[in-house]
Image (spheres, rainbow, N blue to C red):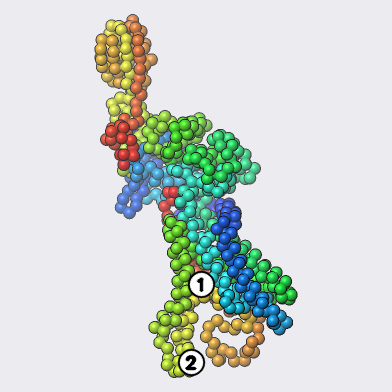
Amino acid sequence: MRREGSAFQGVGAVFVKELSDNISSVRMLMLELLIVLTAMAALYEAIVALRQNTAEDPFLLLRLFTVSQAPLPSFVAVLGFLIPLMAIGLGFDLINSEHNRRTLSRILAQPIYRDALLLGKYLAGLATIAISLTALWLLVIGLGLIFLGVPPGGEEIARSLAFLVIAVFYAGVWLSLAMLLSIVFRSPATAALVALGIWLFLTVLWPMLAPAIAQAIVPPDPRFAALGLDTPGTAIWTLQLQRFSPNDLFGEATLAVLSPTTRTLGPVFLDQIRGAVMGAPLPFGQSVMIAWPQTVGLIACTIVLFVAGYVLFQRQEVRA
Amino acid sequence: MSEQQTNNAAIRPEAVIAARDLTKRYGKTSVVDAINFDIAKGEVFGLLGPNGAGKTTTILMMLGLTEISAGRVSVLGFDPARQPLQVKRRVGYLPDAVGFYDHLSAVENLAYAAKLMGLPMAERSRRIAAALTRVRLVEVADKRVATFSRGMRQRLGLAEIIVKRAEIAILDEPTSGLDPQATIEFLDLIRELKAEGVTVLLSSHMLDQVQRVCDRVALFRAGRIAMMGSVAELSVQVLGAGFVVEVEADGAGIARRLAAIPGVGNVETLADDRFRMTADRDVRADAARAVVAANGALRRLSVDEPSLEAIYARCFQVPPSGGVRDAA
């Protein structure tokens, strides 16, 4: 059955209203404050560490993102941890709050499809995160200029922009998950708890479980163990299993674009590095190619979760 | 008019809402079971029945907010399942316990709805100002809705329908929880809508209020329409006669003359000078003329109009004072 009119009618109105709500909300303010303060602390440590070798590194600006100094993790690691929190914070009550406020049937009685409401809310959430991350990115560039005194090169800007795009895709995964849970659970508290549980599982538990499962599938070879090496089969399985976690995909993709010397994201075999100039940076395009499968993985994950939410929402009875 | 009379009939051209064998099933349970009705333009039509009788589900099917399991419904000539946007452009809906965005003002809430309606900015502002004036919320237009009482929220919901310039207003339990003054004001607003030619579909438990504003009602029971018609028609069907007129007058042959009035079903002589008639309409004027024709002296004339509560109680076999909620 073909529907009349456009599914996107009303998306703009929903987007603008939700974006305005997000930006002005106390919840968003607190999340932004948390991210900015933590990221700034990580950045400060990175700047202190980098001041020692300003003239030596051709990609000094990128180091700002990746260098860590104990006890703080790197700026990228901080974002990898906090972006899911921000996305879950924005998405866990996207739909169920409309049920609870009893606004859903009134809004859907206007000449729009449910698609418009869902898409408008999702895009507004993503735009909110993108705006915050862009502001943070500009802050990093600005502080780098002030404290390191070295202007960023064109490739550094391109690579850091690629990182920004990957970070937005990464946020998209968690926002889709949070939105899906806000459709499944009528209680925002339940949706938030389940989302945080999944995030903790994939961030903390899964990296520990993946090697154990891999070893069960491909038991380690004692000959490799005797040489202090990982068994290739076990290592590959571990890597593949770890890639089920969006955190891992994000970590790998950002490593590829922010560390120009990264040549591969999997186990390295001797025949792969034959003829390679060790430590030489790859061109930007090739780094993007290395990060591409992980980026596509993040996009695919976003699409799958969004579609699941879309289907559930379309079938949901709207009474409130 | 009974349900069976309209079953499978062609949709009348003057009907703005027409349902034919409209059915909604959840699994094997039918919550709305092959109902048929027509609502004419400008009519105020009441949906009555206990909780879970299928009233809200019927409304949701009319708006395309829930799938129709079988049968069809036409709203202003459009099919809500295939042409939901056409229907929603022309139909205003005020849900039970309507919700608004509490952090936004009345104007901002209406502006958001108006944007979703696709109204241009200038038109939006004009219509919102006019609607808020109409529902007497203009003084609190810029206040956050969080501070509004339930009555004010209901009026704001009605303002949204006015902004839309809806041809049909669907009001689900609009006066539930309102104080008497707010209820009176709300019913006045419904009458104003009717006067402007807006068709109103009203779902309610408040029988006396429904009777005050509705031209016709449908009584829902277990997903089916048990009875449908005006209160007078239903009273004749259920109670035998709707109006009870008492006459106190001296004169010869008055009982005979009263019995001859068209529409009078029964005349009971309570005393030499007191008579009680049951009729299918208000026959006080005819009774007065009958007394005068008998050269009698009319001392008192009173009428008891048919009560929807009595009809409902008889139909659902609950005590008249029991109320609708107790019948569920």
- SS state under label 2: loop
Q: Position of residue A165 (x, y in %)?
A: 60, 69
What's the amino acid at mark 2? Gly
Q: Residue at x 47, y 72 (%)?
A: A202
What's the amino acid at mark 1? Pro
Q: Which residue is mark 2?
A: A228
Q: Which residue is mark 1?
A: A246
Alpha carbon of mark 1 to alpha carbon of mark 2: how far?
A: 29 Å
Q: Residue at x 54, y 57 (%)?
A: A121
Res. A252 in view: yes
**Pick the front one: B164 or A53:** A53
- SS state under label 1: helix
Chain containing mark 2: A
Q: Residue at x 47, y 31 (%)?
A: B181
Q: Viewer-nearest of labels 1 and 2?
A: 2
Q: Residues within 10 Å of mark 1 (few under 14, many from 20)?
A: many
For the residues labelled 1 and 2, say whether their Cβ atoms are less than 8 Å apart.
no
